[in-house]
Structures are given as C-alpha cells and as structure tokens.
Image: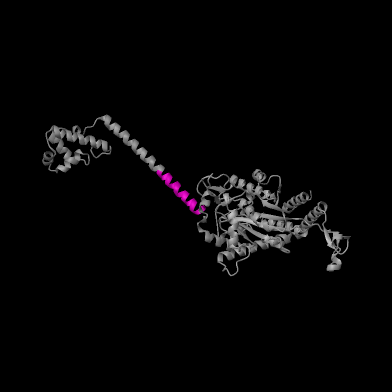
Amino acid sequence: MSPTSKKGSFMNVEIAQRLAAMRREQGYSQEELAERLGLSRQAVSKWERAESSPDTGNLIALAKLYGVSLDDLLRIDDDVVDDVAFEEKDKDATAEAQAQEAAVRANEAAVRAAFEKYLQFDGTPHKKSPFRLHFSDRWAPLLTKLLPVEIVRTDELTVGRSAVAGENGMVRASNALRAQLRSNEREAEDHDYIERCFGRSLYSPQALARIEQRCCTGDHLGCHLWFTRGERVPGQPMRTDTQRLFEQAAEQAKRNRAAYVRDSALHQNALLRLTEQIRNCMLIHQQPEDILAREGRLDGTRVWRAPVLHDGRVFLRKDEESRAGFTVDLMLDASASRLHCQESIAIQGYLLAKSLASCGIPVRVTGFCSLRGYTVLRVLKDFGDKNGEHRVFDYFAAGWNRDGLALRGMGELMKSAPADKHLLILLTDASPNDSHKILPSGKIPLSRDYDGQPGIDDTAAEVRALRAQGIRVAAVFMGENTSVPAANAIYGRDLARIRRIDQLAAAAGRLIQDEIRELSG
C-alpha cells in the first residue's frame, strides 16, 4: 500500500509514525538518515510529521537500509485499514449530502429573490391569496381594456376599473407589499402628492393642523386628514403624472354619467318613487309649522305691527311644506374595494341626493379613502350646492379605507351642518383596511396592521363616539357573508344589508324614513 494512496490523513500518520520508530530502532538521527539517503533533514522530518510521503526510490532505499521488506515497512493492521475506509466513506457521503442541501438552499433563495423582486411575492403561503402580477403607469389602463384584470390597492393613486369582482373587489396586500409602501418620513412629499391628486384643502393649514390635533390620536397617531372638493390649487403647475390622473378621473365621471343615461327611464322612475316615499313619510309624521302671512288666523300679539310698521303679516297659517329639521350625510366608500362597481355607486348616490334635496332635506355626499397615511374626505355635493347632485357623478375609487379616522373627520365636517340633528349613512363593506399601521402605545408596545379585528374595534368605537354626540349613524352594508359579524359589531341594529349596489338608494331611503319617525315620536 502506497503512502500516497487515498486512505486519508490517518493512514499517512500511521506510516509516518512507523518510519520514525524504525529510524530510532536502527539508531539513526534524522540528520544521519538524510545523509545516508542523500536528502535534507527537513525532508525526513516532513515524512515523520506526515506532511509528505517518500517516493518509491526512497522507500526501497529505506527498506534495504533497515533490512526489511517494503510490506513490513508500510504494514498497517487490517482493522485500522477497515476503520479508516469506513470513516472515509462516511465522510464522503456526508459531504455529498451537505453539498446537495446547500445547492437546494441556494436555489430556493434565488427563486424567492426573483419572486419578491419581480412579482412582489415573499414566498410565504397566504390563505386564499391568488397569484397576481402587478402593473403600473400606462400598463394598468391598457390591460383593463384588454384583459379581465384587477387593480390592487397601493399607496399610489390609481384611477381605473376592475373587471374582477371577486370577494366584493377586496384586495389585500401581502407583508412583502406592505414593506414596500411609503413611510411617514417623507411628510412634505406626501402632503404635496395628496394635494396634487385630490385638490386643495377646504381648511387653512392652521385650521387643518388643529383638526388633526383633535382627531389623529390613539390608533390614528401619525396619520393625517385631508378635506377637499377636488378643486385644483390656483397657480400650481400640473405635473405629467397628476395630469394623467385628472384625465382618468374625468373619464370615470363620463362613464358614470353615461351609465345613468343608458337606463334613464329606469333611474327616473326610481328617483320619483324614492322622492314620493320620503315626502309622504314627512307629511304623515311631521306637523306643519305656523308661518307669518297676510291672511289666515289673526295673531293678537302682532296686530300693532300693521299701523306702526306697515307690516301686514299679522296672521298665522300652516306651512303646507314640511321641513325635515335634520341633515343627512352620505359617506361613500371610495377605496379600491369599490373598483368594480363605481358607476352603480355614483348613480345610487345621485338618486339619493336628488330625492332628499327635492324633499327639502339638506344632504351632503362625501367619498372617503386613504393613501400614504392620509384619510381623504372628498365632498362631492355640499349642503348649499344648488343642483349640486350632478357632482356625485365625479365619484371614483382608489386606495385604502381607514374607516375610524374617516368617521372622526366626518364628525368635524358635521359641526358646520345647517341643523342641530344629523343622520350619517355609510356605504360600507365593514372591512377597514389601511397600509398605515397602528403605532405602538403604552398598552401595546408593537405596531399593528389597521386590518381585521383592530380595524373593526376602532371603527365601532368611533361609531359609538358619534352617537354619544347625538348623531344617528346607520350603514348600508354590501359585503361578504364573512363580514356580517363585523358589520353587526360596528353598527348594531342600524344596519341595512343589500345584495346589489342598485338597492343602495332604496335601503338608505328606508333608514331616512326611520329617522323621520324618530324625530316625530
């Protein structure tokens, strides 16, 4: 067996030890042996330290010098040889297995990196999460025309359409996608972005700051509010991306109006029917008020005004037209969950606003969504807007929905309502969901997603807070069966469920009739 045969370092060590022992038995030092063989002492030393092996010529010379055969010179016990062979075989098998495992891990890492980079998928299994490709810029509107695609929620404003209504249009972001969303470190840029996309604020910076001090607390710490009518800031230059968004919003408004015109007769009948129902309810449950007139029942306390002030209105008569005595705020969920039914929501919102205005009930229509930590309340039709119901057709959906903060913001808007009593009706799927997390607090040291139970609990708390202020809060629920418990937990008995969006106006009309009865009771 040669010292250079592959039996591992243990075999070489055994041979080295045998060579050293035989040298000492023959009475040679390393220097003397090297001299007899014509080598350096370092060469002999390396043999005996198993750092190198003697070649065949040196082995023959050693055997002759010691008077032994080559087999005796290199002999190793059979048990040792077997042990070494087994150990080497086991080492080889282990090394091969480790190499294969390392290759698998490297391949998995490469695949995960590719999916995360190009497909925004982190490799983690998600329940009921379909495979999605994400497109932006010009690809999104193009694909909506060519393929049955779905526009997902992001922190970038995307005005578009969805041909997929699965799960009521609800789109949830994976943790990987959430990690890529903007943080609040770029406050100035986010403020500018929101203003350019949605229009100037209804409030001055100072007034808005005071509102945020009151509203952006607790679960909404670090968030912002934006109240707007969608009007551009005078003199602000229009950027290319913003111009495209305004054009897309205008296209959606055209689609909303075109959808109404296509079934104009049907919608007119629905409008007349709803208006009649509300007006009849007012006539039945509300008593006409006494008003000053030039004829009717004489008011003795005002007779003096005729000769002194030449005011002939000294009579009282019943006002045949009842007055509501309350205002109605209609809040339309304008998040990406409504992408698939924007035209229907705009039509139903218009029908409801028009019928209320025809009955003399002050009504305001507001869409709400959230982007980049801002909850945007976009007033489509205000109380004082004459024939402003047509602006409801400017409705479009995008982004997220932070329902609790939207309700807080609506509470601020209602402070300027032209009546003491208020009815707030929401169109909702009872699924609050926002990319901006709930920041850590003293009780809960870790941040949480504004989603699921935390979002439900927060929204329910805000509903209770508004009701404690004397505001009646009701909801028209259009969502999945799985969200029914959440809707009940948030709104309680003041909840009307609809199966189709074209039932919105009628359902809201019934809630308004209930309010009229309550006011008259």
Determine which quarter of the picture holds residue 21.
top left
Position of 240 with respect to 257 (left or right) is left
Q: Position of residue 415 (x, y in %)?
A: 67, 56
Give the residue at x 49% y 51%: 116
Q: Is residue 76 above or below residue 505?
A: above
How far from the left and from the top, in percent, is residue 439? 53, 49
Judge whether residue 465 can be spotted in this image: yes
Residue in view at x 83 percent, y 52 percent: 284
Can I make out residue 333 in this image? no
Q: Position of residue 264 (x, y in %)?
A: 75, 60
Q: Answer whether residue 106 is magenta in the image.
A: yes
Compared to residue 415, the image places residue 8 above or below, namely above
Q: Nearer the viewer, residue 293 or 454?
A: 293
Of residues 480 and 493, which is closer to you in this image?
493
Q: Give the answer, above or below, for where 282 lies relative to 92.
A: below
Percent x, y of residue 489: 65, 44
Which sits in the foreground, 284 or 75?
A: 284
* Residue 33 left/right relative to 452: left
Q: Quadrant of the N terminus?
A: top left
Task: Please say which color scheme the image uses.
Answer: one colour
Magenta range is: 102-120
Q: Quadrant of residue 373?
A: bottom right
Magenta highlight on residue 241 = no
Q: Which is the main secondary structure of the residues drawn in magenta? A: helix
